[in-house]
Image: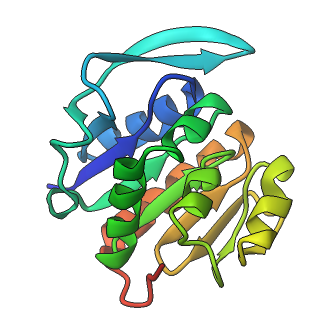
Amino acid sequence: MKRIAILATNGFEESELKSPKEAMEKEGFQVDVISPEKGKIKGWANGNWSNSYTVDRSLNEAKVDEYNALVLPGGVINPDTLRRNEDALLFVRDFFKAKKPVAAICHAPQILISADVVKGRKLTSFNSIKDDLVNAGAHWVDQEVVVDEGFVTSRNPNDLPAFNAKLIEEIKEGKHEAQHA
């Protein structure tokens, strides 16, 4: 059985965690919500705090070799918090080093900039962080979903159907030898 990590903390865009999680569980994958701290994390929806989600494992308990892929939901607060957490950046980098699929949506690529894994990669994101990604060496395009050797990105919650479909396809394909940081 495939086991997937979703890395998030308070302030994640709720639809960007909930929708991929449900789509992957429907495929029979085990999906763990990973966060710097145990307990619950609160989502963000329609400009306000939303539902709480149970954290399955803390970041220091989670090991990359136990997972087949990593999903990074966006939101504005969530990536800004995670990109300042060295353990989170190490966790993200290790997925790239292990050549495993990584998927990021909306503002989540901000974490990837701080993890120093976007240089030379083709991707998309929420349009307000385009300049940050280009300045970090990424090849940014405006498409609903972009796949670059096991690296899946989308722009916003409207892209979730395409994002989820490509994410599942990449997980089923497994490791990508050309996946790199």
Q: Answer with left or right where residue 180 lies relative to residue 175.
A: right
Q: Closest to the observer: 86 or 173?
A: 86
Q: Picture coordinates of residue 163 (x, y %)?
A: 58, 53
- The colour style of the image is rainbow
**Residue depicted at 33% across the width and 34% down the height:** 36
**Residue depicted at 62% across the width and 43% down the height:** 160
In this picture, is 24 found above or below 51? below
**Residue depicted at 61% across the width and 72% down the height:** 118
Q: Closest to the observer: 73 or 168?
A: 73
Q: Picture coordinates of residue 140 (x, y %)?
A: 78, 70
Number of callouts: 0
Q: Picture coordinates of residue 55 (x, y %)?
A: 28, 25
Q: Picture coordinates of residue 128 (x, y %)?
A: 85, 48
In this picture, is 16 found above or below 137? above
**Residue depicted at 65% across the width and 17% down the height:** 45
In this picture, is 180 found above or below 104? below
In this picture, is 8 found above or below 127? above
Q: Answer with left or right where residue 134 lies relative to residue 53.
A: right
The quadrant holding residue 78 is top right
The quadrant holding residue 131 is bottom right
